[in-house]
Image (cartoon, grey):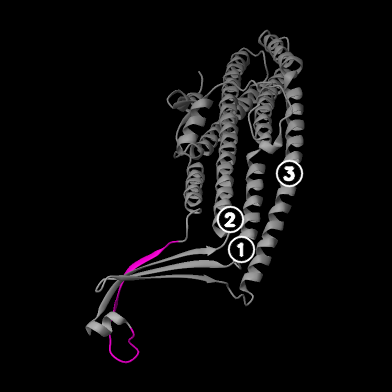
Amino acid sequence: MKTWLPLLLWLPLTCCQALTLGDALQQAEAHNGELAAARAREQQAAAQAKGAGALPTAQFGVGGLGGNGPGLTNSNYSNLFRDDYYVFLNQSTGPFGSIGSKRRSAEFRHQAAQQAVLTQQLTLEQSVKDEFYRLLAAQQRLEVNQRNLELAEEVLRIAKTRHKVGQVPRLDLMSAEVERNRAQQELVTAASELRQSKARLAPLLGDSPQDLQAEGDLTPSTPQLIHKDLQAHPRLAAAQAELQQARQETLLAAQQGNPSANLNLVHDLVIPNYVLQVTLSVPLDWGELGYEYAARQAAEKEAEAKLGQLQKQLESELEVARGTYESALENQSSYREKVLDPAEEMARVTEKGYRKGALPYSQLLIAQRLVSDLRRQFIDKQLEVQLALDALQAALGQHL
């Protein structure tokens, strides 16, 4: 009689939420918190870019004047001997040239934020794919361990039958029981790994840990590896936008020493008349503007250094990812034909020989353990190819 343990461990897979890779990516796109935060930062940068090209905020208000003494020079108050009231408008242009620099700086900041969203999407997509394929591999490992336990139960049943009639020694029966118990423990471990894989995938989808079942195939695709221009990589595009922003910030710091114009308009409410005053002022720098300019120059050099280093880093990551993918694909492609299929055939022949009493249990045990390990290794090799392909696409910054 088969143990109840496999049925208990296998039951959750039959009553959980089925999820394809496309479903997982779509759900992550809609509900992932980190991606939502990146989009909010992009919206914030877009709003700042729209407002950066406007004039400095004007001051409009209502004032009053009253008091007593020779210092009171307001003509309306002096003539009417009562308080005076007026409205005023104050508008400054800011240092000449600074408005355009602010606008361009904000536009580059917005471009960097847009590329940050694309980078976050790529990172999220790679993480979702990786965890989805790990979940799929965990499910397949559980299936392999399930079959191993069923086979161990069958071998144990045969050993018990043959031991009763004196065809095998007590040692073979004990070995079969130990092998059955080992298969049970491996099944428990595989079920635990499956639960952990589900728990890692759930938060990427913007959900709490739940019972998920991946639907799909670990069979790797073989896209054509063509040359891609890394200049289109969102990380590099973001760094280039940040460098341009740093340059505009340096220019803006230099423009703080430019003259600025100011307009003052006052309209009296008691005896209607107005006063218009236009001024042109030049800042006197006691060191603050000069040090700020030096700081902005250093920030610009930092952005240049980061861009150059990122260019080399992305080229290195691409070569590593390409080599890893090609190696994993080559190792996996002939594994089933040259390793797994012959081992499974050997295990079937050995099992038939054991059933007929022509082979000892020790030889059957060796064949069973070998094919069990090879099946799990084949799943791992398929998973390695999928993860390597995900890393290659992330290194390119785009799909193949």
Task: Tell me the tag on residue 311.
Answer: 3
The Cα atoms of the two marked residues, 1 and 3, are separated by 31 Å
**Does residue 190 show up magenta in the picture?**
no
Please give left or right for residue 87 compared with residue 389 in the image.
left
- Numbered disc total: 3
Task: Tell me the tag on residue 101.
Answer: 2
Query: Residue type at mark 2?
Result: Ser
**Could you say whether the residue bearing mark 1 is in a helix, strand or loop?**
helix
**Could you say whether the residue bearing mark 3 is in a helix, strand or loop?**
helix
Q: Is residue 216 above or below residue 84?
A: above
Percent coordinates x, y for residue 222 in the rendering: 69, 21
Stretch in magenta: 57-73
**First-in-chain label (2 vs 1):** 2
The Cα atoms of the two marked residues, 2 and 1, are separated by 9 Å
Residue at the spot x=72%, y=41% of the render? 314
Residue closer to the observer: 108 or 76: 76
